[in-house]
Amino acid sequence: MNKKVTRIISLMAVFGCTAIAFTSCEKHDANSPGVEYMPDMYRSPSFETNLTTLVQKSDGTFDTVAENRNPAPGTIARGFMPYPYANTPEGYELAKVNAHNPFERNDANIKEGEELYGKFCVHCHGAAGQGDGPVAGKLPGPPPPYTAPDKINLTEGEIFQLITFGKGLMGPHASQVSQAERWKLVLYVQKLQHPDGVFPAPIAEVKAPAVTAKAKKHKK
Ligand code: HEC
């Protein structure tokens, strides 16, 4: 007989015997699930956050297991500082004067800002920040030029707050660009506003919350 055919037949015989060996061990019971080869894989304990689950032990009894817990309130991921200003008019006023760029205004950071601007902003704001990107014309109101009289003196904190939370037709960008990237975008927006390299002087910081002297006097 052909060698190849013999080999195929013997392989089939081996598989056949193995299959019979596995299926014939169990008493015939229509409701039996059969031999469980790896029970953990059929009935794994499903762990869910903040639940207490019953896990079956080998002797059939159950153990109560406390699962992953949510972090305690106020927990901060390592190496991450939450942005402290809220998306409210008060948060905006505080960010305006108190939020400062932790990144130096150097060529490398500005270049990174320029690259991010090319990915996330240019289609609306245009290459020179004049509000003439290809999408601008499709918006009911195009973005204002960064150099408009009421925009040219936006502080770094205001620009950061605007990128973070958005404004009007401009959506929030906090989920697309990290805090570090947003600060580099601020450097690039400022470069478009002040190509001569002369930037407005920073405004004196205010203590939060901003309460006027008069209101303070009457607050007992
Ligand atoms: C979908 C288009 C769109 C995109 C994308 C976009 N913007 Fe805007 N942006 C606008 C519009 C529209 C306004 C005007 C908002 C208003 O005044 O209601 C605006 C306003 C601004 C302002 C001025 C805010 C003010 O006080 O009026 C700044 C600064 C700004 N955008 C920066 C950015 C930066 C940086 C990016 C990229 C991370 C970006 N924008 C992405 C549409 C966009």
Image (cartoon, rainbow, N blue to C red):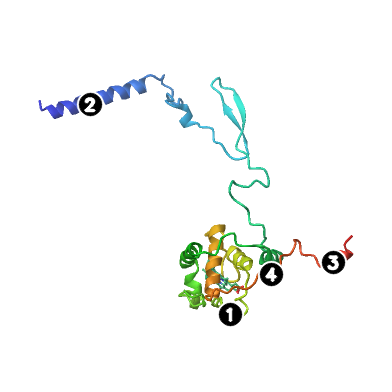
Q: Is mark 4 within 8 Å of ligand 1?
A: no
Which quadrant of the frame does ligand 1 lie within?
bottom right
Three-letter residue code for mark 2: Leu
Which one is nearer the viewer's eye here, 13 or 63? 63
User: Secondary structure beneath disc 1?
Assistant: loop
Name the residue tied to disc 2.
Answer: 11
| Residue at image coords 60%, 35% | 67
- Residue 148's label in the rendered image is 1
Judged by depth in the image, the label closer to the viewer, 3 or 4, is 4
- Residue 215's label in the rendered image is 3
Earlier-in-chain disc, 3 versus 4: 4
Earlier-in-chain disc, 2 versus 1: 2
Label 4: few (<14), some or many (≥20) within 10 Å? few
Three-letter residue code for mark 4: Ile
Q: Is residue 69 left or right of residue 108?
A: right
Q: Is mark 1 within 8 Å of ligand 1?
A: no
**Marks 4 and 1, Cα distance to the nearest angstrom?**
20 Å
Judged by depth in the image, the label closer to the viewer, 4 or 2, is 4
Q: Quadrant of the N terminus?
A: top left
Earlier-in-chain disc, 4 versus 1: 1
Three-letter residue code for mark 1: Ala
Find residue 178 and report its image quarter: bottom right
Judged by depth in the image, the label closer to the viewer, 2 or 1, is 1
